[in-house]
Image (cartoon, rainbow, N blue to C red):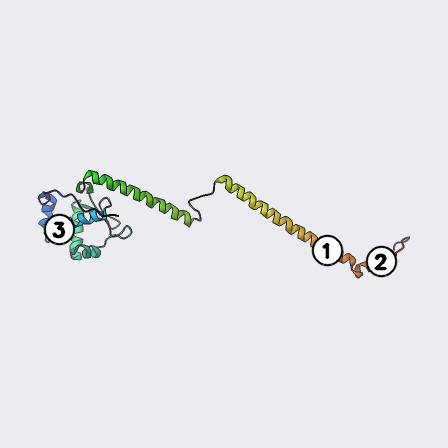
Amino acid sequence: MSEISWVKISSDIFQHRKINQIRKLPDGDSIALLWMQLLCLAGNTNDTGLIYFTENVPYTSEMLSVELKHPVLRIDEAILVFQKYGMIDVQDRVISICNWEKYQNSEKLQIIREYNRIRKQEQRKKQRERSEKVNGKTSATIPGSHALELDKEKEKEKEKKKDKTKQIVLTTRAKNAETSFESEEYRGDVNEFNFELPGITIIN
């Protein structure tokens, strides 16, 4: 996601009632600073107020501690405070800034929304392609009529192979039979059989 170089902050932010309540807490000024840092981080992520390290890797408290240069305990405390005041939401460990639109101008937001819409559309397309590959398919499927023709051709090839096999078997059997007729043992059997028949003369 490409970064944006600004977030819109009201000039009276330090008179805001939530910021006033935060600043009265122990380490309140540091937590208020952390809020500003989270806004900037969401601007850098540039994904409708979401804050994550990568799309598949959400920030942990330790990672935010390194990124924003605050102790881990303060990060955890700030997250709880911001959630309590409805300033952030956390789903599946991904932080999102509530009412993110008010920190962006409307024209820039429209550009961001369009960019995100196209990006998500591309992501869905890639996911479908990966799913089709896993299932042994491709995005370019064979039309139904062409597939039927291929099936018919395959059936014809199978029938041809069967016919050839039958022909070979029959030819082999015929040759074996011919050999048997020509054998001396068989001829002797025939002669012996013919001698037993009256009125038949055997000529050798």
Tell me the amino acid under the disc marked 1.
Lys
- Drawn side of residue 157 relative to residue 36, left or right: right
Contact between labelled residues 2 and 3, with CB atoms less than 8 Å apart:
no
Q: Nearer the viewer, mark 2 or mark 1?
A: 1
Q: Secondary structure at mark 2?
A: helix
Picture coordinates of residue 118, whole percent (x, y): 30, 42
Question: Residue at position x 58%, y 47% from top?
Answer: 157
Q: Secondary structure at mark 3?
A: helix
Quarter of the image with the C terminus in it: bottom right
Residue under circle 3? 33
- Dot 2 alpha-carbon crowd within 10 angstroms: few under 14, some 14 to 19, many 20 or more: some
Residue under circle 2? 191
Residue situated in front as seen by the camera: 161 or 78: 161
Residue situated in front as seen by the camera: 112 or 169: 112
Q: Earlier in the sequence, mark 2 or mark 1?
A: 1
Residue under circle 1? 175
Label 2 vs label 1: CA separation? 22 Å
Label 3 vs label 1: CA separation? 100 Å
Picture coordinates of residue 166, whole percent (x, y): 66, 50
Q: Earlier in the sequence, mark 3 or mark 1?
A: 3
Residue situated in front as seen by the camera: 200 or 144: 144
- Drawn side of residue 21 relative to residue 152, left or right: left
Question: Residue at position x 76%, y 58% from top?
Answer: 180
Tell me the amino acid under the disc marked 3.
Leu
Residue situated in front as seen by the camera: 120 or 29: 120
